[in-house]
Image (spheres, grey):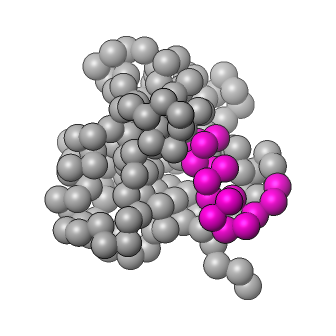
């Protein structure tokens, strides 16, 4: 059996951006028939929201697209996640700093910002502060599409 490609999306609290990316990416790979090749999850760098459900702004956007976040609860990233995942995808520069604090050293170059895969590298703005879940969704879709293209190229996958 072929090993799954494991992707972990990470943000501060794991209730807005990283679960949005997790479920958008899951939907993307499922829709092109590659769902079985991936294991996709999300986590927080902080402990503030551990156990909480997905933020209503993220749920609203995704449910409008027919994507359920049912059962998702915020979890914190651990040092062991570095070994467990092939790609660790941060939403912003602060997440990158905190991820590196958790894992120690990114010796395998697994940690990247989501929008660094696009032609417009920048942070995914945190809708917890901006209130703009629509812009966050647009950035996440663009980032997930670029990430998927990169992964397919690196693993010689044709959809």
Q: Quadrant of the N terminus?
A: bottom right
Extreme top residue here? Answer: 131
| Residue in the foreground of this view, choosing between 95 and 17 | 95
| Residue in the foreground of this view, choosing between 24 and 51 | 24
- The residue lying at 82 percent from left, 55 percent from top is 159
- The residue lying at 48 percent from left, 30 percent from top is 120
Whole-percent x and y of residue 82?
Answer: 35, 69
Please report the bounds of the magenta region as a residue range. 144-159
- The residue lying at 81 percent from left, 60 percent from top is 158
In this rendering, the answer to whether 39 lies above or below 53 is below
Relative horizontal placement of residue 101, taking residue 11 as reference (left or right): left
Confirm whether residue 74 shows in the render: no
Relative horizontal placement of residue 111, taking residue 101 as reference (left or right): right
The question of residue 97 being in magenta is answered with no
Whole-percent x and y of residue 110?
Answer: 41, 63
The question of residue 157 being in magenta is answered with yes
């Amino acid at each position: 059996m072929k090993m799954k490609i494991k992707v972990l999306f990470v943000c501060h609290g794991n209730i807005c951006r990283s679960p949005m990316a997790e479920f958008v990416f899951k939907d993307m790979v499922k829709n092109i028939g590659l769902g079985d090749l991936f294991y996709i999850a999300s986590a927080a760098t902080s402990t503030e929201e551990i156990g909480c459900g997905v933020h209503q702004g993220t749920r609203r956007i995704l449910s409008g697209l027919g994507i359920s976040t049912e059962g998702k609860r915020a979890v914190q990233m651990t040092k062991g996640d570095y070994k467990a995942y092939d790609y660790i995808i941060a939403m912003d520069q602060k997440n990158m700093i905190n991820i590196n604090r958790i894992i120690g050293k990114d010796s395998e170059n697994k940690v990247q910002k989501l929008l660094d895969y696009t032609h417009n590298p920048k942070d995914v703005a945190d809708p917890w502060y901006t209130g703009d879940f629509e812009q966050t969704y647009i950035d996440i879709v663009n980032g997930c599409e670029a990430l998927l293209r990169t992964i397919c190229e690196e693993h010689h996958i044709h959809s």
